[in-house]
């Protein structure tokens, strides 16, 4: 383990200049940072900055380091975010724009404009583009599951719609995406059935997953194809996932990797569970991907590990305690949490091909609205002013301290 201190000086320069930089607080998409002020802020490398002061350079020998961005963050409307993200990340996922409801809102109507902006952005900045997600029960219009005269669609009807959608979408992005989340969140969170009661399973049956992967392979034979889900660190759900993946592999279904979303809390799941999950998946010979990393720091009465976007909880002021900023003690806990996670990721960097954060900075994260709307969460490495948090420095320090590939 060797840390070259001279590589740290630029990092601290970035830290100091950023601390005195942008002062406007961006709460969400509705209030992005003032681009005029933001562009004056030193979020691009200064002449003395060594490349290793960015995440994408620090992890270049380990895995892709990715970020989910909103439409405004890639189409130039939020230029500060666009530049900042390109500086730190080597891969990008569309936060919403490649989901069924965005791309294919009505039968026969495809709208690729917003999603195409990601192709342009990724190519301009030398970033890999990840497609998210082809088949999911959420953010999919009702018509997809409807048949004639108010009845549910038949199996054949729904399979035909699935194939048409995948062919059109994965076909449109053929050669432009590195990989697709083909099926998202098919597993249940409890009960005797390993699979969730989604209309996909109810109407088509359990083999809807096989079909989705085969259709995706047909449409873009060179894209990597992933199964993606949350809560896989839970031993029950993980065992069901391993069984599901083994079944796919045994049946020759074309699958390349498994994504564990990794919407975590400060204490849950445990480091042991996180590491065991990576080991169990790697043992199947699949690529392991951390697809939606964030750490929720807010208290909750509900089942915190359940990242189903349909989960809603009652608002209560005691569940929104950090509106004025994160207390030092929690900031430190968050830094330690990220340090523990990245130590695990780096230990398994031969199996892990990408670690993607679900959001760029605390000013825009789905966790400000999930599972309760309008809270002030602090789940990412950069705060509301794009200022790197202690967690950022922990993560960067670990990357810098890891020997280049081949030196182990
Ligand atoms: C979230 C987006 O971040 C939100 O903007 C949107 O309102 C709901 O979906 N698991 C997933 C992601 O696979 O697609 C979800 O993204 C977060 C949970």
Image (tube, rainbow, N blue to C red):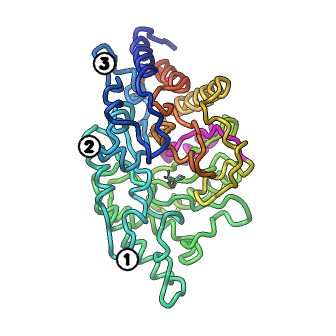
Residue, disc 3: 46
The structure residue drawn at horizontal position 46% and vertical position 82%, both measured from the top left corner, is: 156
Of callouts 2 and 1, the N-terminal one: 1
Which residue in the structure is indicated by mark 1? 107
Residue on which the image places disc 2: 123
Viewer-side residue, 175 vs 239: 175
Residue 288: in magenta span: yes
Between residue 46 and residue 318, name the one nearer to us. Answer: 318
User: Ligand 1 closer than 8 Å to the CB at disc 1?
Assistant: no
Asked if residue 162 is positioned above or below residue 274 in the image, the reply reads below
Mark 1: which secondary structure?
loop
Magenta residue span: 274-300
Q: How much space separates mark 1 and mark 3, taking CA atoms?
A: 50 Å
Placement of 356 over or under 55, stated as above or below: below
Q: Would residue 181 be counted in the magenta stretch?
A: no
Label 3 Cα neighbours within 10 Å, binned few <14 / some 14-19 / many ≥20? few
| Residue 13 appears left or right of 229 | left
Residue 396 pos. (x, y %): 48, 23
Q: Which residue sits at x=60%, y=38%?
A: 295
Where is residue 1? Give x, y as percent: 52, 14
Residue in view at x 55 percent, y 78 percent: 203
Residue at the (32%, 22%) spot, across then down: 45
CA neighbours of label 2 inside 10 A, class few (<14), some (14 to 19), many (20+): few
Mark closer to the chain start, 3 or 2? 3
């Amino acid at each position: 383990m060797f840390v070259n201190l001279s590589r740290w000086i630029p990092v601290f320069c970035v830290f100091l200049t950023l601390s005195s930089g942008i002062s406007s607080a961006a709460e969400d998409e509705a209030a992005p940072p003032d681009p005029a002020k933001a562009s004056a802020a030193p979020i691009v490398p200064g002449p003395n900055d060594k490349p290793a002061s960015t995440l994408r350079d620090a992890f270049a020998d380990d895995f892709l380091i990715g970020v989910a961005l909103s439409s405004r963050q890639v189409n130039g409307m939020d230029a500060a975010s666009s530049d900042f993200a390109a500086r730190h990340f080597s891969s990008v996922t569309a936060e919403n724009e490649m989901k069924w409801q965005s791309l294919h809102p009505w039968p026969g109507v495809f709208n690729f404009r917003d999603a195409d902006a990601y192709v342009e952005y990724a190519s301009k900045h030398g970033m890999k583009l990840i497609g998210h997600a082809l088949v999911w029960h959420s953010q999919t219009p009702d018509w997809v599951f409807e048949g004639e005269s108010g009845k549910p669609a038949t199996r054949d009807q729904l399979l035909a719609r699935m194939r048409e959608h995948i062919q059109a979408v994965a076909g449109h992005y053929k050669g432009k995406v590195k990989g697709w989340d083909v099926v998202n969140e098919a597993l249940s969170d409890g009960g005797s059935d390993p699979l969730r009661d989604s209309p996909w399973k109810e109407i088509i049956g359990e083999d809807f997953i096989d079909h989705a992967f085969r259709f995706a392979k047909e449409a873009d034979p060179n894209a990597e194809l992933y199964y993606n889900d949350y809560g896989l660190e839970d031993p029950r759900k993980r065992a069901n996932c391993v069984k599901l993946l083994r079944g796919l592999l045994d049946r020759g279904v074309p699958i390349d990797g498994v994504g564990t979303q990794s919407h975590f809390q400060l204490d849950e799941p445990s480091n042991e569970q996180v590491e065991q999950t990576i080991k169990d998946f790697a043992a199947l010979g699949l690529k392991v991907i951390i697809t939606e990393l964030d750490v929720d720091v807010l208290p909750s009465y509900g089942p915190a590990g359940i990242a189903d976007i349909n989960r809603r909880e009652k608002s209560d002021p005691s569940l929104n305690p950090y509106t004025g900023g994160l207390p030092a003690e929690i900031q430190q806990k968050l830094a330690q949490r990220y340090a523990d996670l990245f130590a695990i990721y780096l230990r398994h960097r031969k199996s892990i091909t990408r670690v993607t954060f679900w959001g760029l900075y605390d000013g825009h994260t789905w966790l400000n609205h999930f599972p309760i709307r309008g809270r002030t969460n602090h789940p990412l490495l950069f705060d509301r002013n794009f200022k790197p948090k202690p967690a950022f420095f922990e993560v960067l320090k670990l990357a810098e301290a890891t020997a280049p590939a081949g030196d182990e």
